[in-house]
């Protein structure tokens, strides 16, 4: 189904604006996202120092950014669930818990990647 609307460069420009608005909203309203951005910014030079190969650098940096991606997804799910109402519902709680689990799993992967590469470097 082809919906009428913006195409080409105009669509790309609007999509970019919407994405930047989403990042700004996450920064403004989500303390966890702000903390993870700060940790990512601190981790980038450390990744550059720690990595001994290009592949290690890619793994270290991408694992940091996957945590940010997971937090953005978690924040989006929470916003949608909260928008639908304040009453408790099993499916709302499940959706929020699963989105939170995405963040936890991404943090676990990040810690694993950093630990393995650090272990390899210093042992």
Image (cartoon, rainbow, N blue to C red):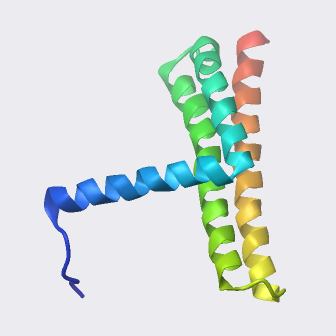
Q: In the drawing, does residue 14 fall left or right of residue 75?
A: left
Residue 104, relative to residue 1: is it above or below?
Answer: above
Closer to the camera in the image, 34 or 65: 34
Taking the view exactly as shown, the residue that stands out farthest to the left is: 8
Q: In the drawing, does residue 2 fall left or right of residue 52?
A: left
Q: Residue at x 25, y 54 (%)?
A: 13
Image location of residue 77, percent across then percent down: 64, 70
Q: In the drawing, does residue 64 fall left or right of residue 100?
A: left
Taking the view exactly as shown, the residue that stands out farthest to the front is: 28
Closer to the camera in the image, 34 or 1: 34
Closer to the camera in the image, 61 or 42: 42
Image location of residue 40, percent across then percent down: 63, 31
Q: Residue at x 58, y 51 (%)?
A: 69
Residue 85, relative to residue 45: is it above or below?
Answer: below
Q: In which quarter of the view is residue 7 placed?
A: bottom left
Q: In which quarter of the view is residue 113 placed?
A: top right
Image location of residue 17, percent across then percent down: 35, 54
Image location of residue 1, percent across then percent down: 24, 88
Residue 79, relative to residue 31: is it above or below?
Answer: below
Total of numbered circles in the picture?
Answer: 0
Query: Image quadrant for the C terminus?
Result: top right
Closer to the camera in the image, 12 or 30: 30
Q: In the drawing, does residue 23 fall left or right of residue 74?
A: left
Q: Residue at x 61, y 21 (%)?
A: 47
Q: Residue at x 65, y 24 (%)?
A: 43
Q: In which quarter of the view is residue 63 placed?
A: top right
Residue 84, relative to residue 76: is it above or below?
Answer: below
């Amino acid at each position: 189904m082809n919906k009428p609307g913006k195409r080409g460069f105009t669509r790309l420009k609007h999509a970019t604006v919407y994405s930047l608005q989403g990042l700004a909203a996450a920064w403004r309203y989500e303390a966890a996202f702000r903390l993870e951005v700060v940790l990512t910014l601190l981790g980038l030079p450390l990744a550059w120092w720690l990595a001994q190969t290009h592949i290690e650098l890619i793994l270290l940096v991408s694992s940091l950014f996957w945590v940010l991606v997971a937090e953005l997804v978690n924040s989006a799910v929470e916003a949608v669930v909260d928008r639908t109402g304040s009453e408790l519902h099993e499916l709302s709680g499940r959706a929020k818990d699963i989105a939170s689990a995405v963040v936890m799993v991404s943090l676990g992967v990040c810690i694993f990647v950093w630990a393995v590469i650090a272990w390899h470097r210093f042992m």
